[in-house]
Amino acid sequence: MIIAIQCTDQVGLVAKISGLLAAENYNIVAMQEHVDKTENLFFMRLEVNKDANADGLEQQLADLLPPDASIKINPNPEKNAIVLVTKEYHCLADILVRNHFKTLGANVQCVIGNHDTLGDICKRFDIPFYHVPYDVPAEPEKKVLEIIAGYEHDYIVLAKFMRVISPEFVNRFHNKIVNIHHSFLPAFAGANPYRQAYERGVKLIGATAHFVTDELDEGPIIAQQIIPANHSLTTADMIRAGKEIETAVLAKALRMVFDDRVFIYKNKTVVLE
Amino acid sequence: MIIAIQCTDQVGLVAKISGLLAAENYNIVAMQEHVDKTENLFFMRLEVNKDANADGLEQQLADLLPPDASIKINPNPEKNAIVLVTKEYHCLADILVRNHFKTLGANVQCVIGNHDTLGDICKRFDIPFYHVPYDVPAEPEKKVLEIIAGYEHDYIVLAKFMRVISPEFVNRFHNKIVNIHHSFLPAFAGANPYRQAYERGVKLIGATAHFVTDELDEGPIIAQQIIPANHSLTTADMIRAGKEIETAVLAKALRMVFDDRVFIYKNKTVVLE
Amino acid sequence: MIIAIQCTDQVGLVAKISGLLAAENYNIVAMQEHVDKTENLFFMRLEVNKDANADGLEQQLADLLPPDASIKINPNPEKNAIVLVTKEYHCLADILVRNHFKTLGANVQCVIGNHDTLGDICKRFDIPFYHVPYDVPAEPEKKVLEIIAGYEHDYIVLAKFMRVISPEFVNRFHNKIVNIHHSFLPAFAGANPYRQAYERGVKLIGATAHFVTDELDEGPIIAQQIIPANHSLTTADMIRAGKEIETAVLAKALRMVFDDRVFIYKNKTVVLE
Amino acid sequence: MIIAIQCTDQVGLVAKISGLLAAENYNIVAMQEHVDKTENLFFMRLEVNKDANADGLEQQLADLLPPDASIKINPNPEKNAIVLVTKEYHCLADILVRNHFKTLGANVQCVIGNHDTLGDICKRFDIPFYHVPYDVPAEPEKKVLEIIAGYEHDYIVLAKFMRVISPEFVNRFHNKIVNIHHSFLPAFAGANPYRQAYERGVKLIGATAHFVTDELDEGPIIAQQIIPANHSLTTADMIRAGKEIETAVLAKALRMVFDDRVFIYKNKTVVLE
């Protein structure tokens, strides 16, 4: 059982929480906490190995903690996810493989593509695929929402989904949409980051997984990684190399998110690995 | 004030410790803990910001904790260090610069070299240098011990000291001698690691900082790092590149050790960064 | 068209080769060369964009170059590969995905497993799978050889194939078998490298892709990579993290091998990226 | 002797150049070349081991190569450098140490600081230090120029020089000023990059060494590197960690520049390592 707590910091919080758990005979298998001293915020993730009445525990914790505390108790860490794609296969295929072998940490319910390119790979893994063309801006999103409504979903994953999402869509899934951006944000936000990187002559290229907010490519960062680049790489080489790093960064970010390790505040994240 | 605790794990240890500190009105500025479940061992490092009677606190903690608890309370995190060298300047110069600008985390008391090559750089930084030739195996170590005895010392740093150390010497400074080894241990232990690496055709080279034990290059590892290598590097190139990584790894290890972040058990370390 | 040359070094080799190509009106699209000065060996990889009579060119080059020259001219860079596996899916699934989307640089002809665990994923990608149990040591290899004989094959890929291969098998496919080893060789050769790494308390874990020779885990290294590790990782965590790095390193090595970028000599490689 | 060539690409350039060198009995010890196909530009760096009449060779090469060829022949690879600093010691101390032990690849002629903080460390290494306060914007630069004029200088190194440089100054030393910027450009250009990075919640921090052009932090990038960051780092921690990476990146960039490995075009670099 995973317990995730986020609240105003106070002297003695760890003592209170671990005292309560010890008194109730929970065995703490893993505990990570972080205090942001600038913001006076406390973050804690616990894994405990007695699966007692989680509702009762939540109330007990709420009685102990500051009134602003967010307490998430997750008896079943398995999440459900819906994946949006365009044409590029690398992130989706990685997600489908992990999903198939039960190592994704979430169940992929369906995949929605604005092209039908990736329908075949979904079919090979017995995952429903919906083709929703995005030629008209307003209508396709409505269609996407209808499809999503038909499935259990904790998170929406944009696995190289190359269409703009409306503020309404973002707000409906507040802090629930994970995107992979093909650059080391905040460098090269927006379109054609590899062309930008090539023209700027950078010596590293990277990828960034982040939650989606209203502002394009500006949401809380979950994971980032880079690989060396140099003059010998063409834009095409950078794109190819970038796909490897995008796949790895999105996989890492999803593992953290699905495992309840990511806390969000002030447009940034605490990731308690 | 830094508190470092190592003991058998028990349910409720964090609660007990943080409860005591809260009751005594210490403000916990930073706290990291680790439990080795295989060995059932608990490790904790705390920074608290009330510098009260440390002796009293140590007793209070001892009363709370299992009888095997090691409790180190460090009101003054400044350490004293003695550095042993041969001819290579890179690690020593880095240590002297950090020492000079008070960012090493320890005060270098003196430097002892089995060659006199590095006397000049020590003099430039007003650090005593002793030249102890190592042509005869038994005698020079006696001389080194006499010099060490004349200075305050918490740690001995082997900053590219290329002579064998006797078991007696090692045991006298148990878990207090930090060495930088010019390879990614356990690969290429022993002499000429870069030649070995070159001949093996490795694609990465690395460096390892570790505590010194009786067995050559087999002590608890504190820090390791690598850099990419390839066929274009000669042995000489690997040596040059290796010096950069050795300097960085030793600096990192010393920062961890001098900041009371390294716990030793079972020939390995817990480093609570 | 790719040209790969390996021979004794001489003054003027680059001039001779590029002079011939210029005279024959080949346009050199990419050229990398390396000279091992210790061994006095010359390595060159060229991409040229006129697909002329390769046989004629080979003779012309042979006339120019030292008599020991190995000249490989590859008008069709597409290779054929056969993959051997046991139970772990991560490397195989990555290979199958790349193969399916035509980005592997080779065509996977079939997969042979000593368990049947991975038959299903092969079937999903329409790749023939053969289950050859390895309970009896001598017979199964004969069966594997028969299967291999039925397909075009330039390379054999051991994608987490956890059975020992006989010297006869190795010699039959000299410098044609690529293995992924789950450690940073030469550290932790042999079985259970993650347990070894955990017990040694290393701060980095890695993976090594290499050609297979008679001596276990001692063949020429093609690619290596590492990721940071620390005390918080259990052996199981190391295995999980190791799978990510194994997948990435094998993919990198295969890309280099299939793209005729890897030259072998003296139990090591030159990789002209 | 090092030969650096930059010109329009043509079929047969490598053959012409290596043919000439072979005819003149130069032994090519190292050769790297690069062709930018988009711009149709050719770059080559050669190390040859006969130190013949370089002027004659330059003319011979000029006769062979396209009329726009830039040919640099460097019989003596030792450069002279002048270093500008403010208060931070880390990059300067590293440069002074390497200079002292003759591994910098250039001779530091003098150091100029807009504060006097770093005069002491220069004195310890017998390097002239000039204190030029920058309270008035126009005058100090004139003074700096006078000091520079009194020394041999191939390059000006801004080793954490925190003052704006005028366009006149930049143009006078076109492609001769190397700066270390404390971020992974183009992210976080301008002031307080670590504060920006902290507030953005990035998971990596980096440093960039680049040539200085008129536009702030927009000049050709020579080297970049990053280190992982996370929520546990305060702005102060990021600054400390950043200093390590700044030191390493500037050292790498200077090694490349002083070794005639860096070619500049279109606001970017080719670095022939």
Image (cartoon, coloured by chain):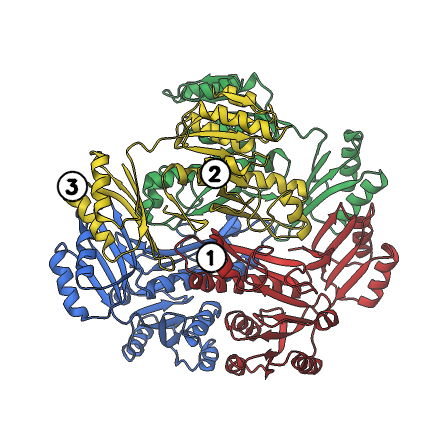
Chain colours: A blue, B yellow, C red, D green
The correct choice, above or below, for A205 with respect to D224 in the image is: below
Q: Amino acid at mark 1?
A: Tyr
Q: Specify the label residue D47 is tagged with.
A: none
Badges 1 and 3, same chain:
no
Residue at 72% from the left image edge and 44% from the top image edge: D31
Q: Quadrant of the C terminus of chain C?
A: bottom right
- The chain identifier of the residue carrying mark 3 reads B
Residue A111 in the figure: left or right of residue C118: left
Badges 3 and 2, same chain:
yes
Please tell me whether mark 2 sits on a helix, a strand or a loop: helix
How far across and how far down the image is residue D174, in percent?
A: 55, 31
Please tell me whether mark 1 sits on a helix, a strand or a loop: helix
Q: Specify the label residue B171 is tagged with.
A: 2
Q: Which one is nearer the viewer's eye here, D113 or C124?
A: C124
Q: Specify the label residue B24 is tagged with.
A: 3
Q: Amino acid at mark 3?
A: Glu
Mark 3 and mark 2: Cα distance apart in space: 38 Å
